[in-house]
Amino acid sequence: MLKFQALPEGKHGFELLHLSPVIGTEVLGIDLAEPTSDKVIRWLRELLVKRKVIFFRDQDISKQQHVDFARRFGDLEVHPFTVNNEDYPEVIHLDNDREHPPFINIWHSDVTWRRNPSLGSVLRAVDVPAVGGDTLFANMEAAYDALDEPTRRQIDKLVAVHDNEGFLLGMKANGASDDAIEEKRKQFPPSTHPVVRTHPESGKKSLYVNAAFTRNIKDMSDRDSQGLLRKLFQTASNPDIQCRFRWRKNSFAFWDNRGAQHYATADYWPLTRKMERVTIVGDRPH
């Protein structure tokens, strides 16, 4: 890993290490169990926007502290389709083992089917396998910049449709009634977002379509839409714009869903991997 020069405000006593030149920085020396000043929170937010995902190690904190830390960056959402903690509904349990194989090994940005998709997610490792289970992150601003000029001109004004059909199919597979599924579909209808969004804090452009939730591009034939989407989805798979994080117990990853995608590897199955995620509400993409 490469040492990273501090942002103008200074490092506040923390050491920063890159995981790659273009995305991912580990913050060393921070204790999330201790009160964090507004100045440090502002600095972490700027670091998040710049580096797309930041990591913290050895954070043996409570669920309340996890929730409290995430809430310093905005309102928190309750996911309507996942297994949520009974006492802290903002906390999602992502547990996989022999009986519950992983299914999120696909490049995506969280909840883009919402009208206001998330700002970011704060994920904690509770139980990780001895080998495997890494998460990869891709800088989608770099993905956009790497496109040829004709493609950038083609997509700059396009709009795509995002939906939660995968979750609805999961409800059906788990025995939910047609009425219950239809109620969820009405409650959370498909959303439209620009294919290229502008980050509300940095002003930078990024690709904002993903293989998990983007279904088609508006006002384009299905053949042309799917062909273009396949091309754009593939950009996240470029190792030149990625970093890879090896989890340990009580490691945290905080990623910016507005400018990054992630991929949770399934190579550890049938071993056990248990994670807890808190998600911060974002704004409507533009």
Image (cartoon, grey):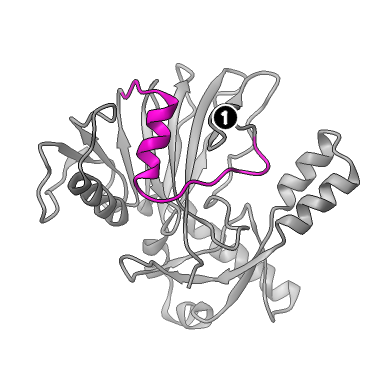
Residue farthest along the right direction in this orientation: 178
Q: Is residue 43 magenta?
A: no
Q: What residue appears at the point 22 percent right and 47 percent down from the top-left corner?
A: 38
Q: What residue appears at the point 49 percent right and 79 percent down from the top-left corner?
A: 156
Q: Is residue 125 above or below residue 199?
A: above
Residue 189 at x, y percent in the picture: 72, 61
Pick the front one: 140 or 80: 80
Pick the front one: 274 or 185: 185
Residue 78 at x, y percent in the picture: 58, 43
Q: Are there few (<14), some (14-19), or many (20+) residues within 10 Å of tag 1?
A: some
Residue 236 at x, y percent in the picture: 48, 55
Q: Which residue does the numbered mark 1 point to in the structure image? A: 93
Q: What residue appears at the point 60 percent right and 40 percent down from the top-left corner?
A: 104
Q: Which residues are magenta?
A: 59-82
Q: Is residue 265 something that shows in the picture?
A: yes
Say left or right for 234 vs 121. right
Q: Is residue 63 magenta?
A: yes
Pick the front one: 12 or 153: 12
